Image (cartoon, rainbow, N blue to C red):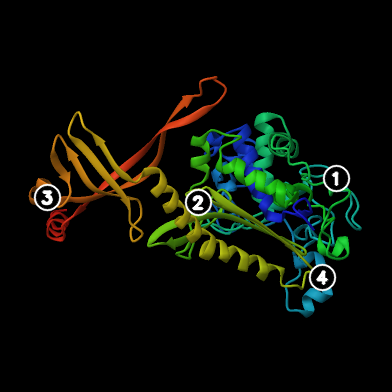
Amino acid sequence: INKDSVFRLASVSKVLSVWSFLIEVGDEHFNDPITRYVPELGAVSNISATGVVYDDIDQVRWNEVTLGQLASHLAGIPRDPAQTDMSAELVPQQAIALGLPPLSEDEIPKCGVTGLLRTCSRSGRSEEFFFLSSLTTAEMISQLLKQHPIFPTGHSPAYTNMAYALLGFAQEAITGTPVSEAITSNILFALNMTSSSFSRKPDSGGVIPGNESVVGWDWDMGTISPSGSLYASTADMVKAGRAILGSKTMTPAQTRRWLQPMSQTGVLGSAVGAPWEIRHLMIGGRLTQLYTKQGDTGGYRAALILSPEHDIGAVIFSAGPIESNSAAVRETLMNAVGKAVLPMAETQARVEARDKFTGTFTDETTNSSVTIEVDHAVPGLVVKHLFSQGVEVIGPSSPFIQIYGAGQSARLFLTSLKTLRNTEDGKDTYESRLGFRATFSMLQAQWTRYKTRV
């Protein structure tokens, strides 16, 4: 096994699906309803019984579900069209013996149950997976319309695979290009991810920890492929992570909007993005965020980890028999990123900041100077002294201390604002200036007075 060995990405594929949508379409369509692009979902009735205006318990309000909610697990829809549905696994006599109520034929899924039924398609038939004969109805949509909502739209995150199939349908309706082709062209080919593919297993180089059908190497995900079908190597996913952090395929503004929380979870230390699983960590007394996405299918475990603040990331793959501890291995490595790698990145950042920005800088023509230091006890750069026109603006003798209670010191924080200039040959650009924001220390008595006033 090496950096070019191929694993299944599983749900890390969702990152590439949303990424592809943003490359081709952008987030200006995130507030569009899915029914605009998948009108079949508008077939649900608004009235299910006499006197009932809308039955939210039994029917998803598909006209309220937006593309942005689909991308961020906020649509309130079920996880899958039928995966692990026991009604397809049990004969009626078995269900009754287990105390389950009998179901009508119309209530039992005809596709999409892993290992038993063939994959669902949007319309018409798809290749048979095991034993069912062909169907000519819009089977996937039909099953979706029968499912109950988990939450009202936009209420609370609920993990879903089906949402990314619908997002792919919307992308194709807008651009005319299937999501499989869009991901292949805009990401895999564009970044030279030569070991990766959308849903076609590679001919060689695969990590297969057992029988292909048992460990999930050859599982066909059909319509929900955008949620988990990709194959990739460590080297290729490193390229993908660097491209995301470096805005290689989108504008920096679009990347910044993408790397943001969309909703909080019930756990204080985590949030949800599109489709990010965001971890909140305290590093050096300061809150930072890790943008992660995990994936699990069969015997495969995967994770993509990005820290936009530190401009670093990690890729984790593990594989083994389904009953192995590969998930625990992944979690151990993910925790190591937060507990070991990020603190080391902070230390290295201080070293680089000391080399680049600290010292005393003087302008003799105006009798002005500034002294900047690094203090390991506090974040940012520390302004110890600032003289302007011979007057100590920042420092122990600053007149602002008596007037405003502030001025004894200040801290500088990078704002990510910069000035870009062309190189002399005009072939490239470089950062000629970096923007900082200053915050001033305030005496406790003055701070208490201002706080009380507010």
Report x, y in % for residue 39.
Answer: 66, 38
Q: Secondary structure at mark 1?
A: loop
N-term-proximal mark, 3 vs 4: 4
Left or right of residue 48: residue 155: left
**Location of the N terminus (image quadrant):** bottom right
Q: How far is mark 4 from mark 2, CA to CA?
A: 34 Å
Residue 428: which quarter of the image? top right
Residue at the spot 54% in from the left edge and 20% down from the top edge = 426
Report x, y in % for residue 86.
Answer: 76, 68
Whether residue 6 appears in this view of the structure is: yes
**Amino acid at pointer 1:** Arg
Q: How far is mark 2 from mark 1, CA to CA?
A: 33 Å
Q: In the image, is residue 245 above or below residue 335?
A: above
Q: Secondary structure at mark 4?
A: loop
State yes or no: discs 2 and 1 in contact (Cβ < 8 Å).
no
* Mark nearer the viewer, 3 or 1: 3
Mark 2: few/some/many CA within 10 Å (<14, 14-19, 20+): many
Q: Residue furthest top?
A: 425
Closer-to-camera residue (183/317): 317
* Mark nearer the viewer, 3 or 4: 3
What residue is disc 2 on?
154
Q: In the image, is residue 405 above or below residue 425?
A: below
Q: Residue 397 shows which numbered tag? A: 3
Q: Residue 90 shows which numbered tag? A: 4
N-term-proximal mark, 1 vs 4: 4
State yes or no: discs 3 and 2 in contact (Cβ < 8 Å).
no
Q: In the image, is residue 175 above or below residue 392?
A: above
Q: How far is mark 3 from mark 4, CA to CA?
A: 82 Å
What residue is disc 1 on?
125
